Image: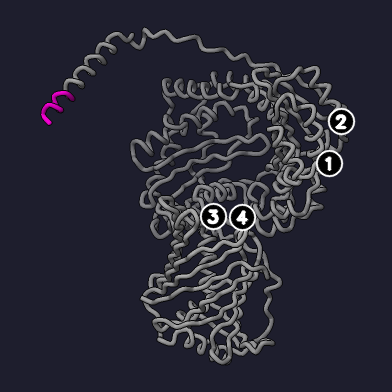
C-alpha cells in the first residue's frame, strides 16, 4: 500500500510539472489574438401586394434547400364573444387537424409525412396564422395543398369535439401551477375580469362554440385584405413572386378587419389579494400596475430603467433581494409596453411563506429608490451595453429579420423601428432614467397578489390593507339531466341505509386500514388490459394508497385529503387538484366508505326497481352529487350504484354505474368480490377481488 501511495504522489508531481510548463507557455489574456467575428449584413426584404390586398414579404436564403412560408391573419381571440371565449383557439386547431375539402386529415397527414414537410395553423389573442416548412424541391407540389387547407377547411365535428376536449382538459389543470395562477389572476386585476384581456376559457364557453361559429369566423377573416405572408428560403425572388401570385391571386379581398382593442379603464389603487394554495410552502408574489404602449416616446428610456431595476443577474432586484438579503428563490420584473393595448408594470418574487412580507417590502424599496436616487454613470453604461448586446440576437438570422418585419407591419410600426430603438437607447441619460421612474412608476398604488399557503402566511399581508381572497374555483357547467325532482321518504331512507351499513360491517366500526387485493381489467384504446391492484384505505388518516402492477413496472398512487402523487420507479409526479378531488368523489360514493362513515350521509327511500331492488338516494356534504343505491331487500347489500359527476379530464358530465355481486366477509367487513363499472353505458372496468383484510 505504501508503494502505491508513492507511485500516486509521483504521478501527481509529474502532472503538476507538466501543467505548470503548459501554463507558463500560454499567453496572457491581453495577448490573445481573437479571430475576426463574422459580419452579418441585414438582408433586404422584398415586398409586393396583390390586387386583393394580400401583402407578401420575401427574403432569399440559399444556405439550405429549405423554404418556410408563414401567413398572419388579422383576427384573434380579442374578437371572441365573451360567452364563446376560446372560439379562435379551437378554429386554429381544427383548420389543420381536420384537413381540407381536397385533402382530408388522414390523407393530408400521410402526404406531409412522405415529404418530411409540415403545415400548421394556430389561433392567438390578437392574430391567427398558418405556416408551412418543406424542402425546396416539394414547394410547387405542396403550395396548392397549403392554400387549400387554409382556404377550404373541412372543420369536421369529430375534430371540433377533440379540440374542445383538449381545451377543457387544460381548463381542469389551470390551477395546478403556482406561477400560472399568479400570472393569470394578476392580468385580471390589471385589466378587469370582464374585459377581453382578463377573460378565460371555461367549460361552458368552450361547449358554446359551434361549427357554424368556426365557419363564420373563417369566412370573415381568411380573406386577402386581412392576410400578410412572409416567405424565407432557397428560391429566386422573381420566380417565387409569380408562383405566389398564381396561388393566392384568386382569393377574394373581403372586408378588412379592425383590431382596435377596447380601452382599458384603469384606476391606480393599492390592493392586497390572496389566492390560498394549501399544497405549497412558498409564496409567488406579483405586484404592480398598468404599463404602457410601444408608441410612447419614452419607450427606450423605460426599457433602460426596466433593465436597471430587473435586468437579470445584474438588476437591482436580483442583487438586493436575492443576493444581499437572501429573500428569494427567484426575483424578476418588467415594464411592458403593448403594441395594441397597454402592457403591465410588474415585479415578482418566489420566497418562503415566512418571508413574504419582508420580500414585498424589499421590492417596494427598490422601486422607490429608482425614483429617489440617480443611477451611476457606470451602472447606466453597463446596462445599456448589456441591453444593446442582447438586442443583436433579434436579427441574427434571415428568418428573424423577416419575422420582425412581419410583426412591425401587422401592428403598424415602421420598418426601421428596430434601428430607431437602438439609437434612442444610446441617447438615454441618467436623468432620463430617473424621470421615467418618477413619471410612470407608482409604488404608492401597487396591486399586490400572493399565491401561497394562507395558513403559513398568517397575518403578514394585513399590514398592506384589507386582504381580498380570490376564489379560483373552476365553475362546472350546469347538468340539466341531473335535476332530480323525485321526492323521497327520509325515514324509510334512514332505515334502509342503516340496514345497509350493518350488512356491510357486521363486525361493527372499522378502525385502522382496509386493504383489498384484486385484479382489474380496464378498457384501453388498445383493448382490455388486466392489472393486479393492491388498495389500502387508512380510515383514520384519511389517505389511500394504491399499488398497480403494469407491464412496465409498479405504479404507486398516494392520495391524502389535500394532495396526491403518482410514483413510477424513481420518478414521482404530483396529481392535480382536480384529479385528487375526483379520486375522493369516487371513494365517497363507494358503499364501503358510506358504511364506515354512515353518520356523514343522508338517505331517501325512492321505492323499488322493476327487479325488486330497494332504491335509495344518498347525499353528503362531502359529495358534489347524489348517488342512487340499489339494495337487495333480503340482504340489504348493494347490487348497483349510479352517480352523475363532472369529469374534469374530459370536461363533461358522465354517468358512472357499478354492479356489485359475490359479497364475502373477512375481519367483520363484507366486500363485493365482483364489480362491473360502466361510464355512460360503456364498459369501463371489471374488478375481481382475491382477498380483503382489516388491520
Residue 174: % across, % down? 57, 53
The answer to whether 393 is drawn above or below residue 310 in the figure is above
**Residue 125: which quarter of the image?**
top right
How dense is the environment of label 3, judged by Cα within 10 Å: few (below 14), some, or many (20 and up)? many
Read off the residue under disc 3: 175
Q: Which residue is mark 2?
A: 52
Q: Nearer the viewer, mark 2 or mark 4?
A: 4
- Mark 1 or mark 4, which is nearer the start of the sequence? 1
> Is 591 left, or right, of 12 in this rendering?
right
Tag 1 residue: 102
Mark closest to the chain's N terminus, 4 or 3: 4
**Up/down of 138 relative to 238, above or below:** below
Q: Which mark sits nearer the N-terminus, 3 or 2?
A: 2
| Alpha carbons under labels 1 and 2: distance apart | 24 Å
* Secondary structure of the residue carrying numbered label 4: helix
**On the image, numbered disc 4 is attached to which residue?**
169
Name the main secondary structure of what is drawn in magenta. Answer: helix
Amino acid at each position: 500500500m505504501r508503494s502505491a501511495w508513492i507511485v500516486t504522489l509521483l504521478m501527481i508531481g509529474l502532472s503538476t510539472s507538466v501543467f505548470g510548463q503548459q501554463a507558463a507557455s500560454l499567453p496572457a489574456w491581453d495577448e490573445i489574438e481573437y479571430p475576426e467575428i463574422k459580419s452579418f449584413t441585414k438582408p433586404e426584404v422584398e415586398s409586393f401586394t396583390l390586387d386583393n390586398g394580400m401583402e407578401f414579404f420575401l427574403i432569399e436564403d440559399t444556405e439550405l434547400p429549405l423554404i418556410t412560408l408563414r401567413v398572419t391573419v388579422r383576427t384573434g381571440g380579442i374578437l371572441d364573444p365573451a360567452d364563446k371565449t376560446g372560439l379562435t383557439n379551437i378554429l386554429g386547431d381544427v383548420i389543420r387537424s381536420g384537413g381540407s375539402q381536397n385533402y382530408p386529415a388522414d390523407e393530408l397527414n400521410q402526404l406531409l409525412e412522405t415529404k418530411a414537410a409540415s403545415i400548421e395553423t394556430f389561433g392567438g389573442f390578437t392574430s391567427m396564422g398558418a405556416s408551412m416548412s418543406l424542402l425546396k424541391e416539394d414547394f410547387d407540389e405542396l403550395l396548392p395543398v397549403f392554400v387549400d387547407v387554409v382556404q377550404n377547411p373541412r372543420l369536421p365535428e369529430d375534430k371540433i369535439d377533440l379540440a374542445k376536449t383538449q381545451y377543457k382538459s387544460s381548463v381542469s389543470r389551470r390551477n395546478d401551477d403556482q406561477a400560472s395562477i399568479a400570472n393569470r389572476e394578476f392580468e385580471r386585476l390589471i385589466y378587469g375580469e370582464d374585459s377581453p384581456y382578463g377573460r378565460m376559457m371555461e367549460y361552458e364557453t368552450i361547449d358554446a362554440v359551434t361549427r357554424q361559429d368556426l365557419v363564420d369566423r373563417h369566412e370573415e377573416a381568411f380573406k386577402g385584405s386581412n392576410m400578410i405572408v412572409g416567405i424565407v428560403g432557397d428560391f429566386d425572388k422573381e420566380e417565387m413572386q409569380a408562383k405566389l401570385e398564381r396561388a393566392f391571386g384568386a382569393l377574394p379581398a373581403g372586408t378588412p378587419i379592425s383590431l382596435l382593442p377596447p380601452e382599458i379603464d384603469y384606476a391606480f389603487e393599492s390592493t392586497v389579494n390572496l389566492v390560498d394554495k394549501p399544497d405549497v410552502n412558498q409564496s409567488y408574489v406579483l405586484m404592480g400596475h398598468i404599463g404602457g404602449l410601444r408608441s410612447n416616446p419614452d419607450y427606450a428610456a423605460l426599457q433602460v430603467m426596466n433593465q436597471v431595476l430587473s435586468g437579470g443577474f445584474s438588476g437591482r432586484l436580483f442583487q438586493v433581494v436575492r443576493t444581499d438579503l437572501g429573500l428569494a428563490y427567484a426575483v424578476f420584473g418588467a415594464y411592458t409596453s403593448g403594441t395594441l393595448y397597454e402592457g403591465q408594470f410588474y415585479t415578482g418574487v418566489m420566497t418562503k411563506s415566512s418571508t413574504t412580507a419582508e420580500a414585498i417590502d424589499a421590492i417596494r424599496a427598490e422601486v422607490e429608490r429608482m425614483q429617489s436616487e440617480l443611477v451611476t454613470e457606470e451602472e447606466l453604461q453597463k446596462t445599456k451595453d448589456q441591453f444593446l448586446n442582447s438586442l443583436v440576437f433579434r436579427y441574427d438570422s434571415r428568418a428573424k429579420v423577416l419575422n420582425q418585419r412581419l410583426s412591425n407591419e401587422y401592428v403598424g410600426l415602421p420598418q426601421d423601428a428596430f434601428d430607431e430603438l437602438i439609437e434612442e437607447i444610446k441617447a438615454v441619460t441618467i436623468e432620463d432614467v430617473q424621470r421615467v421612474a418618477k413619471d410612470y412608476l407608482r409604488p404608492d398604488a401597487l396591486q399586490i397578489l400572493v399565491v401561497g399557503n394562507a395558513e403559513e402566511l398568517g397575518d403578514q399581508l394585513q399590514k398592506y390593507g384589507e386582504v381580498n381572497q380570490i376564489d379560483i374555483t373552476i365553475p362546472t357547467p350546469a347538468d340539466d339531466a341531473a335535476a332530480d325532482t323525485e321526492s323521497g321518504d327520509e325515514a324509510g331512507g334512514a332505515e334502509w341505509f342503516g340496514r345497509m351499513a350493518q350488512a356491510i360491517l357486521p363486525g361493527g366500526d372499522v378502525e385502522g386500514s382496509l386493504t383489498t387485493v384484486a385484479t382489474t381489467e380496464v378498457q384501453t384504446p388498445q383493448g382490455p388490459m388486466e392489472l393486479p391492484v393492491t388498495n389500502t384505505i387508512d380510515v383514520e388518516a384519511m389517505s389511500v394508497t394504491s399499488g398497480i402492477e403494469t407491464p412496465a413496472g409498479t405504479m404507486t398512487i398516494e392520495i391524502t385529503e389535500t394532495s396526491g402523487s403518482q410514483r413510477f420507479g424513481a420518478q414521482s409526479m404530483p396529481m392535480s387538484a382536480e384529479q385528487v378531488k375526483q379520486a375522493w368523489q369516487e371513494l365517497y360514493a363507494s358503499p364501503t366508505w358510506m358504511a364506515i362513515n354512515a353518520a356523514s350521509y343522508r338517505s331517501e327511500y325512492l321505492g323499488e326497481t322493476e327487479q325488486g331492488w330497494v332504491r335509495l338516494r344518498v347525499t353528503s356534504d362531502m359529495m358534489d352529487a347524489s348517488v342512487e343505491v340499489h339494495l337487495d331487500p333480503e340482504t340489504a347489500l348493494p347490487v348497483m350504484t349510479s352517480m352523475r359527476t363532472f369529469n374534469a379530464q374530459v370536461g363533461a358530465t358522465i354517468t358512472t354505474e357499478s354492479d356489485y355481486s359475490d359479497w364475502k366477509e373477512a375481519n367483520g367487513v363484507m366486500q363485493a368480490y365482483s364489480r362491473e363499472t360502466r361510464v355512460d353505458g360503456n364498459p369501463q372496468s371489471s374488478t375481481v377481488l382475491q382477498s380483503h383484510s382489516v388491520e
